[in-house]
Amino acid sequence: MKKYIMPFMMLAVFETVAVVLWLTKDNLFYLFNFSYIGLAISLGVFLFIRRYRHARRIVQLLIGSYMLVYLGIVSNENMQIEGFWYYLFSGVFEAATIHYAVAKIFGPLLFGRGWCGYACWTAMVLDFLPYKTPSAPRKKLGWIRYITFAASFVFVAALFLAGAGGLERIMFLAFLAGNVIYYAAGILLAFAFKDNRAFCKYICPVTVFLKPMSYFSVMRIKCDKEKCISCGKCKAVCPMEVDMTDNSRKRKNGTECILCMECTKVCPKKAL
């Protein structure tokens, strides 16, 4: 039973967040929201331990579709980065600000870029494309993410400075338009670079929050040097081109690991 401790630990973490937010915000929604996400992640970890090959994809679909369809479209919440700026400028710790604090700002200190591998609704769609492992070396285009990050900030700041009315409606429309743009850009880049995760590597503004925190992540893939035979299979299947054989936090593309566990599946010596 020891091998099943991890899913229970993950569930306990999210249940703690759920109960604390429910009691402090006096809103039952947070109990449901984080309990659901915790159950989905715990289920995925359990299935992975059971060696079910589609464990991560199940979690991705459960959480990604919930956040896109229910929180975004049905509940009219902008859960993208513009929604974060909107609530931050409004001085309200609700919806997107809580989401970003848990999943993308402080959460990565515990689980790194796990958001990108298990919950992102953009990647949820992009991962269905045929280029699951990049066929060409990584491009030096990571600087674009800082432009999209700044553009999202300027867009929302300009609305507040201009005193625009109907901001909630504008944010919802921005969410819909933003998703169309993200999906279109992500699909075009995937086919142009033959890499499903090209959007994540070069365009996604959220990674500006994720990268620095992920450097200190508690949950990391590590290599047992005594077992490793340097076959290179782990590097070949990594969608983010991380050097998993290097245990240093400064390893190549170290803050890019999305904990997809593909490297652990192909390692012939179970060194990862």
Image (cartoon, grey):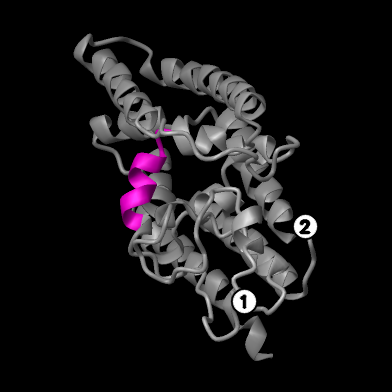
Q: Write down the region rendered in magenta.
A: 204-213
Answer above or below: position of 232 versus 136: below
Image coordinates of residue 75 in percent, x first then y, are 56, 32
* Residue at the image position 34 percent from the left and 40 percent from the top: 208
> Looking at the rendering, in which quadrant would you find the N terminus?
bottom right
Question: Is 210 contained in the magenta span?
Answer: yes
Image coordinates of residue 71 in percent, x first then y, are 56, 37
From the viewer's perspective, tell me whether residue 150 is left or right of residue 46.
Answer: left
* Residue at the image position 68 percent from the left and 79 percent from the top: 269
Along the line of sight, the residue nearer the viewer: 99 or 106:
106
Task: Name the disc covering residue 154, or none.
Answer: none
Question: Is residue 107 in sight in this rendering?
Answer: no
Find disc 1 in the rendering and name its residue: 229
Disc 2 residue type? Answer: His
Question: Is 114 contained in the magenta span?
Answer: no
* Residue at the image position 79 percent from the left and 62 percent from the top: 53
From the viewer's perspective, tell me whether residue 244 is left or right of residue 39.
Answer: left
Find disc 2 in the rendering and name its residue: 54
Question: Is residue 4 in sight in this rendering?
Answer: yes
* Residue at the image position 68 percent from the left and 41 percent from the top: 127
